[in-house]
Image (cartoon, rainbow, N blue to C red):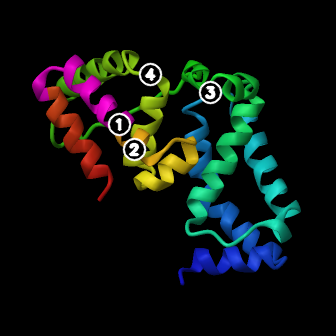
Amino acid sequence: MTREEKAWGEFRSGDEGALKFIFNIYYNPLFNYGHKFTFDDYLIEDVIQDTFVKLWEDRSKINETGSVKNYIYKTFRRRLIRKLDYAPQVMAFPAAQDKIDFNIELGHDHQMISNERAKRIQQNLADALEKMLPRQREIIHLRYFEEMDFDEIADVMQLSTKATYKMLYRAIDTLKKHLPRFDYLVIIYLLNLSRR
């Protein structure tokens, strides 16, 4: 049992210190994830705090989970989308969720490529990402930056695992179609590097 899993059990039993431990682990990653939906720092912080307050209030009703990270991301995402006033649209029309602006910033390795080439690749990537649906950008973030497996992504994004595979394939295919070959290879290399 990891320290995080142990803390989750302690938190569910009413240990405030365990909740603080979990909060400290996930605050920055959730803040960064929230930035993929909105640049409103105050809103993101508010939703993070709301998420943990709600977890504390509901602790006695929360079951064990196979992935603490997955549970927290799913809870945070749901609350953030509600705060952004997309919940009614999402509930009625799942495809409407694609209207949420979801941005990805990919850092570049200066030792591997020159600054000028890195800027060009970054601009080409930004152009290619514009051709992608926001949910495709989100799935790339969850897979390569949050290192979630397909079942976890499906749970967070409320998709089937099969749909998750398809969406990731389409996202990568979109990159391939809209990037010069060298840029595509560098970006795929950097995405895979980020998962190690």
Number of numbered markers: 4
Please, is residue 32 above or below residue 9 in the view?
above
Q: Residue at x 85, y 71 (%)?
A: 60
Nearest-to-viewer mark from 1 and 3: 1
Which span of residues is magenta-colored? 166-182
Q: CA distance from mark 4 to mark 3?
A: 18 Å
Left or right? Give the position of 126 relative to 56. Answer: left
| SS category of the residue bearing label 4 | loop
Name the residue that disc number 4 marks. Answer: 133
Gap in Å between the C-alphas at discs 3 and 2?
31 Å
> Nearer the viewer's eye, disc 3 or disc 2?
2
User: CB atoms at circles 1 and 4 under 8 Å apart?
Assistant: no
Q: Which residue is mark 2?
A: 162
Q: Locate residue 148, reporting x and y percent.
A: 44, 54
Residue type at numbered disc 2: Lys
Q: Residue furthest left?
A: 182
Task: State whether residue 119 is above or below residue 62.
Answer: above
Q: Answer whether labels 2 and 1 touch (C-beta < 8 Å).
A: yes
Q: Nearer the viewer, mark 1 or mark 4?
A: 1
Question: What residue is pinned by disc 1?
Answer: 166
